[in-house]
Amino acid sequence: MFAHQLRTALCIAWLAVSVAVYGALLAPLALSPATVYALAPVCQWKAKYNRECILCGMTGSFVAISRGDFQTAARRNQGSIPLYLALLTNECVAFCFALGKLGRAAPSRGWSTEAV
C-alpha cells in the first residue's frame, strides 16, 4: 500500500515539475528575449561572490536555442544544449505518460471510437 502511494506521489510531483519545465521551455518561444531576461531570477552566486555558477548563461542559451542559434547557446553555457535536450525528452515522456494515464482512467462507455 505504501509503495503504491509513494509511486503515485512521485508521479504527481514529476508531472507538476514537468509542467513548470514546459513553461520554461516555451517562454523563449512565446515571449521577447527582453521579457524572458526580465522574468529570469538573478544568479545569487554571481550577486554574492561575483563568480559565475554552473548554470550562469542558461537563460541566454535557452533564448538562443529557441531561435536556432546553437553556436551562441554553446558559447554562453556549454551544458545548455545537452540540458535542453534532456528537458525536452522529459517533456515528451511526461506527455506520453499523462496521455496513457488519461486513457486508462476514461470510462469504457462513451469514449470508444468504434461505431456502435
Image (cartoon, helix red, strand yellow):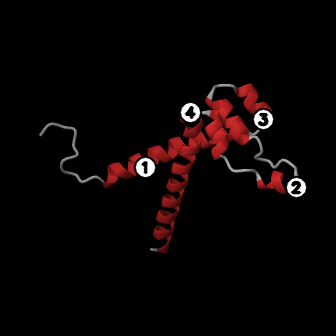
Query: Label 2 neighbourhood size at 10 Å, few (<14), some (14-19), many (20+)?
Result: few
Which circle, 3 or 2, is nearer the viewer? 2
In this view, the residue in front, 25 or 36, is 36
Q: Position of residue 48 (x, y in %)?
A: 84, 57
Percent position (x, y) of residue 55?
76, 46
Instruction: Give me the C-alpha separation between circle 1 and circle 4.
Output: 23 Å
Q: Which residue is mark 3?
A: 76
Residue type for callout 3 = Arg
Nearer the N terminus, badge 3 or badge 1? 3
Mark 2, residue position: 49
For label 4, count other residues whose C-alpha is less than 10 Å away and answer few (under 14), some (14-19) or many (20+).
some
Residue at 33 percent across and 48 percent down: it is: 103
Name the element at disc 4: helix
User: Which residue is at a point 66% across and 31% down the rendered structure image?
Assistant: 65
Neighbours of disc 3 within 10 Å: few (<14), some (14-19), many (20+) = some
SS assignment at label 2 = helix
Q: Mark 2 or mark 3, which is nearer the start of the sequence? A: 2
C-alpha separation, residue under disc 3 versus residue under disc 1: 34 Å
